[in-house]
Image: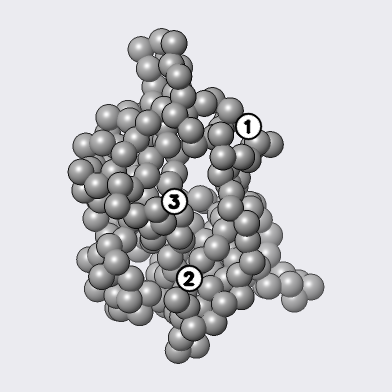
Amino acid sequence: MPSRTWWSFTTKYNVAPGQYVPAIRWHDGQSEAVMMRWGLIPSSAEGRAADTPLTVDAEGIMASPMFRSPWLEGQRCILPMSGFYAWQLTNRRYRQPHFIRLLDRSVFAVAAVWDRSVSEDDDVLESCSIICVPPNELMMRVANTDGRMPAILRRRDYQTWLRGTPVAAKATLAPYSKSGMQAYPVSPRINSIELDDPSLIRPAELA
């Protein structure tokens, strides 16, 4: 458990860009649990939410002006989640949503990077983006139009990810084993950001 807990949240089944998500980071010599806006706003933006990427490829962090500085300064965090969605393009050109979860963990950790931006009014905004890695075989089958998947961390790598050097932290980023994952189709209701209830992750009855 984090040493300091500042977060407050309820279970969500449909997180939209710009909403706040729970995150765990290493800050001021200890772990803390906070809420962060999903979609990174760099410090240079001075609080203006213009281009806020939701994800960043692990291999492209150092080449990105937006992510290079927080990465080198160790601004890494963990986003706890119970699953995520991916869309499969069918033969009928329909994008069928799937829910992906782990078989042995009801909640798992996804690697992310964060930054702090301060507006002209001194409002502090902390935000994050999920780190993505190449897909495993399951993700290639399901998300056949997107060659990425969230970087799911192994338990033994949590401390290295949060506190290690950039080189050590990057070594923890790898596609999760397909044998430990499950994917199944869900209702297209997930496509509406207005909806947020447990039925969104129930298996769909396909025609």
Q: Point out the frontmost of discs 3 and 1.
A: 3
In the picture of the structure, the residue carrying the numbered disc 3 is 82
Three-letter code, disc 2: Ile
Tell me residue 59's x, y (percent). Answer: 29, 55
In the picture of the structure, the residue carrying the numbered disc 2 is 24
Mark 2 surroundings: few (<14), some (14-19) or many (≥20) residues within 10 A = many
Residue beneath the point at 25% across and 51% down: 176
User: Which of the 4 quarters of the picture holds residue 174?
Assistant: bottom left
- Which residue is most to the bottom? 29
Against 156, is 55 above or below? above
Mark 1 surroundings: few (<14), some (14-19) or many (≥20) residues within 10 A = few
Residue beneath the point at 46% across and 61% down: 79
In the picture of the structure, the residue carrying the numbered disc 1 is 192
Residue beneath the point at 54% across and 25% down: 188
Closer to the camera, 194 or 51? Answer: 194
Secondary structure at badge 2 equals: strand
Ranked by sequence position, the earlier of labels 2 and 3 is: 2
Against 32, is 181 above or below? above
Tell me residue 184's x, y (percent). Answer: 37, 31
Three-letter code, disc 3: Ser
Residue 65 shows up from this direction: no
Task: Please report contact status of discs 3 and 1: CB closer than 8 Å, yes or no.
Answer: no
Three-letter code, disc 1: Ser
Q: Specify whether 42 is left or right of 112.
A: right
Residue beneath the point at 52% across and 26% down: 187
Secondary structure at badge 3 equals: loop
Task: Please report contact status of discs 2 and 3: CB closer than 8 Å, yes or no.
Answer: no
